[in-house]
Amino acid sequence: MQFIFVVCLVILGCSVLDTQGMPEKCYLPEDYDDPRCRAHSGRFFYDTETNKCKKFYSCWNIADGYFKYRECTRECKGK
């Protein structure tokens, strides 16, 4: 039982360290996608579960996410 607890702590610690230093807009949730905004160009956010930038659509805040996949990858994945 203690072994499982220690393993969970190590995994949690590694995941926290892995995402430190990333800009806030890397963390946009996937469910932020709005189907009403499909006509607008999509933007990208970093999915920490898959370690990849994914496209989403938003028509409210110009600061949401990244316009280019390459920029998202450079800013979020390399951290």
Image (cartoon, rainbow, N blue to C red):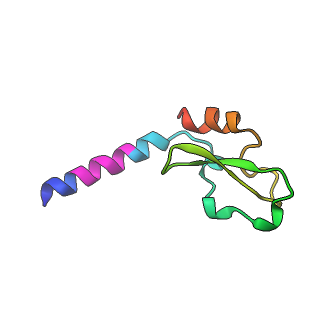
Q: Nearer the viewer, residue 20 or 52?
A: 52
Residue drawn at x 74%, y 38% is: 68
Looking at the rendered image, the quarter that the N terminus falls into is bottom left
Q: Is residue 37 magenta?
A: no
Residue drawn at x 69%, y 47% is: 44
**Could you tell me residue 55's position as x and y percent?**
69, 50
**Could you tell me residue 21's position as x and y percent?**
54, 39
Which stretch is magenta?
Answer: 7-14
Q: Is residue 10 magenta?
A: yes
**Residue 14 against residue 74 in the figure, above or below:** below
Taking the view exactly as shown, the residue that stands out farthest to the right is 39
Q: How many marks?
A: 0
- Dominant SS of magenta comes to helix
**Could you tell me residue 50's position as x and y percent?**
50, 48
Position of residue 60 in the picture relative to residue 45 (left or right): right
Q: Quadrant of residue 74?
A: top right
Q: Nearer the viewer, residue 69 or 2?
A: 69
Residue drawn at x 76%, y 66% is: 35
Residue drawn at x 62%, y 43% is: 23
Q: Quadrant of residue 69?
A: top right
Position of residue 74 in the picture relative to residue 49 (left or right): right
